[in-house]
Image (cartoon, rainbow, N blue to C red):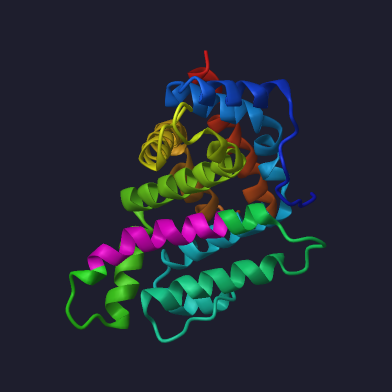
Amino acid sequence: MGNWRLGRLAKTHRWKQVIELLENAADVSDLANATYHAAENSLAAVPNDEGFTRTLTTIFQFVDAFHAKNPDADLRRQGFEIGEGSVFDYIAAFRQKAQREVADLRSRSDVAEIAQDAFTSAVFGSTSPALLSLFGTTKTDVRQALTNDLRGKRFERVMHEFFVGFTNRYLSYHLSRELSNHVGIGKGMANVDAHSEFAKAFELHVRQTVRITDDFVPGWFGKARWEKRLTHEEVAKFSHIAFKKISGEFGRGAQ
């Protein structure tokens, strides 16, 4: 498997359709689907990016440790370097290992960095509210909060946020430069506020689309963990299926 950097989209017919939708202030669902089709080839290639699949493997290893009797010991066994024990330390341990896993690739994988950012945001967004409600938070409190969030229905929500964050960031990357050309008087989005509202609506559409993975992800993880198949090869297979589901859902939305 190779790895690659995000590049500029070619001026294809599909990308011209995205621009036309912006110019006509199209419904965000139409724009989201047109954006997907404009980025279709590169999105379909995400599971082939070794940096991404290594990062996803690291994500599942991190989650796996919080299903063990002694999460800290299991994290260290798997190569995560835990610091003092704040939520930031645990997140830093994930980031550091994820970055080490892709360090030997011949070129930097921007897709891996997007995935790392998305998972970091998902975990912190889920865990920090519980910790902020506690006075004098201890390492035990942090570990328990992470354990709670990385199991059962909460784990499903964290992974939902991961796929939302990743897909939204990825597609928004392809839109970002073009959007700035369509903000202003007489254009598709009259001002910055309209741009902000569009971004919120676009994320909502992505959020609704990636729900297709909500049941699949925890089901796959539980089975793979039980069968001790949380390997890079198996995660790569999982990734292909997950993105096929997401792509199919975008496709259905375009019909």
Q: In this view, does 113 lie to the left or right of 200?
A: right
The segment highlighted magenta reads 115-130
Q: Residue furthest top?
A: 255
Instruction: Kindly identify the residue that appears in the image at 66 percent across and 23 percent down.
Output: 16
Q: In this picture, is 228 found above or below 144?
A: above
- Determine which quarter of the picture holds residue 130: bottom left
Q: Percent x, y for residue 243?
A: 59, 36
Q: Which residue is drawn at 50% across and 49% down?
A: 221
When the figure is inspected, residue 159 is found, relative to residue 241, above or below; the finding is below
Residue 250: in sight, yes or no? no
- 188 is higher (above) or lower (below) than 157: above
Residue 131, position as x, y percentages in the image: 25, 70
The outermost residue toward the front is 185
Marks counted in the figure total 0
Q: In front: 131, or 215?
A: 131
Magenta-colored stretch includes residue 179: no
Q: Residue at x 82, y 62 (%)?
A: 106
Indicate whether residue 121 is drawn in magenta.
yes
Q: Given the current orientation, which residue lies at the most extreme right position?
A: 106
The location of residue 187, given as percent across then percent down, is 48, 28
Nearest the eye: 235 or 134: 134
Please state if 199 lies on the left or on the right of 95 as rendered. left
Picture coordinates of residue 200, whole percent (x, y):
38, 39
Residue 181 appears in the rendering = yes
Give the side of residue 144 with respect to residue 8, left or right.
left
Q: Quadrant of residue 110?
A: bottom right
Q: In this view, does 235 lie to the left or right of 134?
A: right
Closer-to-camera residue (217/35): 35
Magenta segment's dominant SS is helix
Q: Residue at x 38, y 52 (%)?
A: 155
